[in-house]
Image (tube, rainbow, N blue to C red):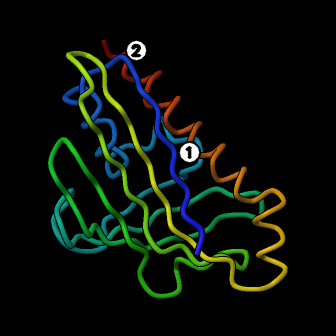
Amino acid sequence: MTVLNYSYAVNFSRRKLWPLVAGVFQNRRYWDWLEKVECLSGKPQELGSVWRFHVITRAGLWQLEMEITEWLEGERLALTPLGNSGVFEDIRLFQIVIDLAEKSDGQTQIKISGEYEPLSNWAKLKNLAFQRQRFLDLVAQSVNALSRVAAAEA
């Protein structure tokens, strides 16, 4: 299993960032890699609710169904794929966790962790060669988008 960890401090309070993180379920306007998001079951933004993410990839559109497995308002969000929807391009995604930790008044540490597993020897080689870096770049772009939107809405 591969675990990706990305941590970055931004000059915004956790209180300001949380609605943007949780907003991925309501408005994809600042996530370039999302075409659309749908609530399939449960109440929006609540533990146990199930969502379908229409993810834009190089290979086309990928529909990923995920359940909210952890929701600590203002602090932590964890998502786990359902069934085989977490399998794409010989990779199985296990979990994505977003943590917001207040460093000081007006500064927040964003930590995004993802767990996945390459499913074949070829996928393991691809992961070592370039896929792991591509995933980290995607996470970095997402954090930059959060910073841009937070600044625009300040």
Q: Residue at x 35, y 32 (%)?
A: 109
Q: Residue at x 51, y 44 (%)?
A: 6
Q: Earlier in the sequence, mark 1 or mark 2?
A: 1
Horizontal side of 6 relative to 138 (left or right) equals: left
Q: CA distance from mark 1 to mark 2?
A: 20 Å
Q: Residue at x 31, y 65 (%)?
A: 39
- Up the image or down, 107 lies above or below 100; here it is above
- Up the image or down, 148 lies above or below 119; here it is above
> Which amino acid type corresponds to the residue marked 2 in the rendered image?
Ala
Quadrant location of residue 27?
A: top left
Horizontal and vertical percent position of residue 133: 72, 50
Nearer the observer, 65 or 136 = 136
- Up the image or down, 35 lies above or below 124; here it is above
Report the quarter where the N terminus lies. bottom right
Q: Residue at label 1?
A: 139
Q: Residue at label 2?
A: 152
